[in-house]
Image (spheres, helix red, strand yellow):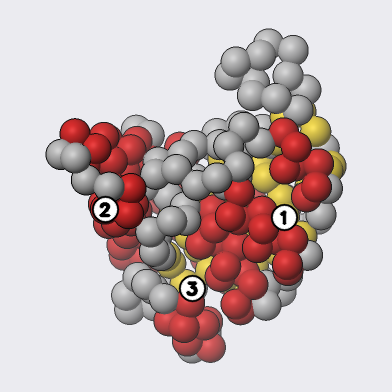
Amino acid sequence: MRIVIRIGGSVVASPINTELMSKYADIIKAVKQQGHEVAVVVGGGALAREFIGIAKNLGLDMAAQDEIAISCSRLFAQLFLKKLGEAGCNKVAVTLGEASQCLSEGKVVVMGGLKPGITTDAVAALVAEHVGADLLVKGTNQNGVYDKDPKKYADAVKLDHLSLLDLTKILELNVHQAGMHQIIDPVAVEVLKRKRLKFVVVNGFEPNNILAAINGENVGTLIE
C-alpha cells in the first residue's frame, strides 16, 4: 500500500519534541518494513507561526509569510529525514516530482511546505494525489475530528466517521491564511474531493495510532 503520513507541527514542533520525532521515525521504518511505500509531510508548528508573526511585523505580504513558514517546516523535515537514516531519500523533497522519484527508488519521502498559498495539509493531499496513494493519515493534537472546536466548546463531540462534504461544514476557515491552524485546511479538502482518498485523522501524540489506522483499526476519525 502507498501511504502518505502527515505529522502535525502541533504534535512534534509546539514545542519541539525530539523524543516523539524519534518514535515517529521508528514507526515509519516499521511501516516501510511491512512492505508499504511511505511519504511523510511535516509541519512547522509554533516556530513557523512565530516567524509568520515576525514577517507580518516587517510588513511582508502573505506570500512572503508563507515562504518563511515553508522554510521552518523544511527544517523539521530535514531533522526527521536525518533521523530516518538510510530508509529516507538523500534530501528533503521540494517538488511533487522529487517525491515521486524518491518513492520509485524505494525510499521514504520526507517533505515540509511546498509553495505559498497552501499549508502542509494541502501538500500531503497533493502528494497523495500525485503518487496515487491509497491512504492519507494525519497525526494531530486532537483525538480526531469534532463537530466543533473542542478547545472552545466543552460539549464538542468527536466524530468517528464523516464525509468530506460534512467536513467542510464544520471547518471555521474556508480560505487559506498564513499560519492557519485547524484540523485540515480548505485547499486539502478540495484535493481530497478530487482524489476520493481514504483519510484518517488520529491523535498524533500516540504514534502507534498511525499503525492502527494503516491496519484498518477503528481509531480517530475516518473521512471519505
In the rendered image, residue 82, in percent from the top left (x then y), is placed at 31, 65
Name the element at disc 3.
loop
Residue drawn at 66 percent across, 14 percent down:
153
Residue 141 vertical placement versus 12 (above, below)? above
In the rendered image, residue 29, in percent from the top left (x then y), is placed at 52, 65
The amino acid type of the residue labelled 3 equals Val
Say which quadrant the C terminus sits in. Answer: bottom right
Which residue is tagged 2?
64
Which residue is tagged 1?
199
Label 2 vs 3, first from the N-terminus: 2
Mark 2 vs mark 1: in front:
2
Residue 150 vertical placement versus 139 (above, below)? above
Mark 2 vs mark 3: in front:
2
Which residue is tagged 3?
108
Nearest the eye: 157 or 30: 157
Nearest the eye: 29 or 9: 9
Residue drawn at 24 percent across, 37 percent down:
56
The amino acid type of the residue labelled 1 equals Phe
In the rendered image, residue 25, in percent from the top left (x then y), is placed at 46, 57
- Label 3 Cα crowd, 10 Å radius (few <14 / some 14-19 / many 20+): many
Name the side, left or right, on which 180 lies relative to 54: right
Label 1 vs 3, first from the N-terminus: 3
